[in-house]
Image: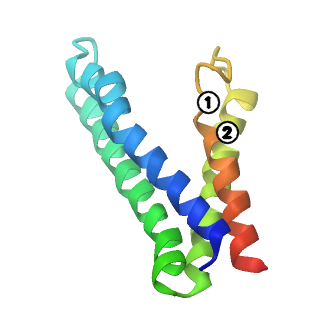
Amino acid sequence: MAYPILAAGSLSAIITLIHVFMGGPEVARPLLAAGDLEKQPKYVTYYCWHLVSISLGLMSLLFLWPALWDGSNDLAIMGSIMATLFALWGIGLLQFSKADLTFTELPQGWLFVPIAIFGFWGSLF
């Protein structure tokens, strides 16, 4: 068993659960309740929320499958690439956008850094 890949999968699964069970009430419900948004942008954003939920769940499987069931490390490499891109976008969003937010207000990008590190470490060595 590749323990770094298992660590990446476990962290990814934890982030998925946080996204669904904590982020849902904190982000998705207020989004749907927002009266100042028109229907189309509101439901496109809500749709994207669910796409992220699906992507995070699949990322967990990309790590857990090779870690627990002796699957191909290519799956973990794909999960590591996803985690790297999610980290770069999340960190870069605050650096290069006009969003007046700090990393403590929008820490999501940093959550993917250890996943990417563990994933690449376990799949390449």
Check the image and report above or below for 59 versus 20: below
Q: What colouring method underlies this structural image?
A: rainbow
Front-most of residues 109 and 18: 18
Mark 2 packing: few (<14 Cα in 10 Å), some, or many (20+)?
some
Q: Please report the residue visible at 70 percent of the width from the left and 37 percent of the height from the top.
A: 91
Q: Amino acid at mark 1?
A: Pro
Q: Residue at x 63, y 48 (%)?
A: 112
**Residue 107: assigned label:** 1
- Type of residue at label 2? Trp
Q: Secondary structure at mark 1?
A: loop
Residue sitting at x 41%, y 38%: 18
Which image quadrant: the C terminus? bottom right
Q: Do tag 2 and tag 1 residues touch (Cβ < 8 Å)?
A: yes
- Residue 33 percent coordinates (x, y): 21, 18
* x and y percentages locating residue 72 in the rendered image: 56, 87
Q: Quadrant of residue 55?
A: bottom left
Residue 51 in the figure: left or right of residue 4: left
Asked if 70 appears above or below 17 in the picture, the reply is: below
Binning the other alpha carbons within 10 Å of mark 1 as few (below 14), some (14 to 19) or many (20 upward) gives some
Which dot marks residue 14? none
Residue 16: x and y in percent read 42, 48
- Dividing the picture into quadrants, the one containing residue 90 is top right
Q: How many labels, in total?
A: 2
- Asked which secondary structure carries label 2, the reply is helix
Q: Position of residue 44 (x, y in %)?
A: 30, 39
Whether residue 55 sits left or right of residue 7 in the image: it is left
Q: In the shown orientation, is residue 37 left or right of residue 77?
A: left
Which of 48/77 is in front?
Answer: 77
Q: Which residue is mark 2?
A: 110
Identify which residue, 44 or 11, lies in the foreground. 11
CA gap between label 2 and label 1 equals 6 Å
